Amino acid sequence: MNSRSVGFPFGPASVTLTMALLAAAIAWFQVAPALEAAPAAGYDVTRMVLLYSTLPRMATALLAGSALALSGALFQQVLRNPLASPTTLGISAGANLALAVATLFAPALLGLGRDLVALAGSAIAAALVFLLGVRRGFSPFSLVLSGLVISLWCGALSAILMLLNERYLVSLFIWGAGSLSQQSWSIPLSLAPKLAAVAILSALIIRPLSLLELGEAGASALGLRIAQLRFVAVAAAVTLAAFVTSAVGVIGFIGLVAPTIARLSGARRPVEILVWSSLMGGTLLWFADGAVQYLAGAMADFLPTGAVTAVFGSPLLLLLLPRLKTRHRVLQGRTRQGGRLAAGPKALLLALTAVAIIVLVGLFLGRALDGGWAFLDPAAAGEILMLRAPKVFAALASGAMLAVAGVILQRLTGNEMASPEVLGISAGATFGVTVAVFALAAPDLASQLGSAALGALIVLGIIFVFAARSGLAPERVLLAGIALSAMVDAVVGILSASGDPRAMFLMRWMSGSTYNVDGVTAVTVSAAAALLIALALSTRRWLDILPLGPHAATALGLPLTRSRLALFGLAGLMSAAATLSVGPLSFIGLMGPHLAREAGLVRAFPQMAGAAAIGGGLMVLADWAGRTVVFPYQIPAGLVSALVGAPFLMLMLRKKA
């Protein structure tokens, strides 16, 4: 938490005043035309917009920014974690999901109060995050990773709800991404007293928070009840985030950025950090929102402020990584001694048999016109198989590539939580496809594949640059991926919220839909899988040696830098090719390697082969379930596998380090 070595040349008062002046300058350009214009006779549209839209929006930005910054400062102080915030801990995502569920299925609950619904969602998300983090001592890494998992799971559920209720898609998407657009003073006037009450409660615990600076042992010796203090502080922080999310949606990274700037500018004591963080958060969001409106012009109301702030907040998370203490540990393979799972060739044979059965089920078992279960009618087999087979084999190839990419990344980083989805590689591929969709009139398959590969490789390169200095320490690699993934998702969100009709295609593609997969796409993805997996299997010696550590690998004659770059590139290419069919949120790249290792496949070659079979089978099963379980509706395969994969990752986090 100490920031004396790096800081701004000015104090917190100067930094806050500078941001306030910049925000005020932009605000003047917005309000000046209305103030200088002569009053119109009758209904004055210009002044009505000023009084009931522009000014309430500025007030909302000040209140929301201050509340989120105070929430982040409380989290960081009580958890002793410089990366804690409502965004990184998944608090805002929980509130957003709760409000979406209530809006679609239980609107009567909103009559009791949107704040209560949002608070319930935030509280559940916070409880899950702390339940996952308690086994690892609330370490910064475990809490942020837990928050990522909760955020992804909530996002997958929200995406399913939106896809099944498309008439609400645009409004829910823009609101969920954080929109400060106002049509009256009702929101800022309702927010102000609630936020003030929580702020007063926060002021009452400043002295106990100061005692935490002595360490837990010293604070306990002075009679401080640390558990109770943590509960009160976390409850206040969660409440602040829930109130803001209920009012304006998810505003990202203000709760991380403002406290960090406060500390870097010289705030040391808890009272200074809390006060200056609140002031900086309000002025920062006021400035960011004003800049968005001024630069975007007529499109300002369609750009979600939350997504825009995430674009600028994610790089800060990358810059904070050198200040996070990390520890590197070698990923140890293990076999199940005396267990029921077979090892070696038997396990691999069992996995291949299971995949063959799943593929047959995906091809020949489905729903009849009356909604009942039915095997494939021989009379219509040709026509139906022409529709089903491309989807099944594209899902099989994509799942296999993601699983093999997961094996490579886990062995390369020594981190059992590494996967294309968690590291943001799939998000990079998504960004590449997004650029192709919006830049080209009708991008063909080759353009999409090339753009996805380029995006994935760029993300991999940035991760490698930021994590190389720490020897690819697991925490640095994962947190760099989290930051880049958040930034890429925000950019995609801004493009999707622009109102362009291609946004619907992009939304479906991001969710991992095989709707548009045809024979050409299936053959292309399958050929890419065969080639890239064969290349991955040829690197088995590297992958057996690299987990031993850099010194041992060098002593054994392994070209360390060249092998790492080649493996990173191979993982990126496989992730890009797979993302074209199953989207960026499948979690197959995480589950496949773990299940293969639990089956006793420890060495690189059998683990990759087993993971490919398991990953491909799981993805085919997810695709089949998405097409049949809620017939006649279809849920994209990527979202189905994400709903299963996120709880799986939660179970992994529950294990002691």
Image (tube, rainbow, N blue to C red):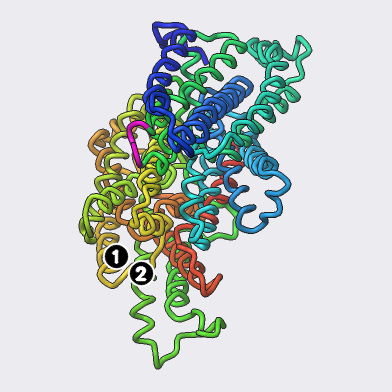
Question: Badge 2 is on which residue?
Answer: 393
Q: Where's residue 559, x and y in %?
A: 23, 35
Q: Where's residue 529, x and y in %?
A: 29, 60
**Type of residue at label 1?**
Ser
Specify the quadrant of the image occupied by residue 340. bottom right
Query: Residue at image x 67%, y 15%?
Result: 209
**Type of residue at label 2?**
Phe
In this view, 93 is above or below 577: above
Q: Nearer the viewer, residue 325 or 482?
A: 482
The first of marks 2 and 1 along the sequence is: 2
Q: Where's residue 561, x and y in %?
A: 25, 33
Query: Residue at image x 51%, y 80%?
Result: 367
Residue 288 in view here: no
In this view, 346 is above or below 327: below
Q: Which mark is residue 526?
A: 1
Q: CA distance from mark 2 to mark 1?
A: 7 Å
Q: Is residue 361 left or right of residue 400?
A: right
Alpha-carbon neighbours of circle 2 within 10 Å: few (<14), some, or many (≥20)? many
Magenta residue span = 294-298
Decide: marks 2, 1 in contact (CB < 8 A)? yes
Query: Residue at image x 61%, y 38%?
Result: 129
Most common secondary structure along the magenta stretch:
helix
Q: Quadrant of the C terminus?
A: top right
Residue 155 in view here: yes
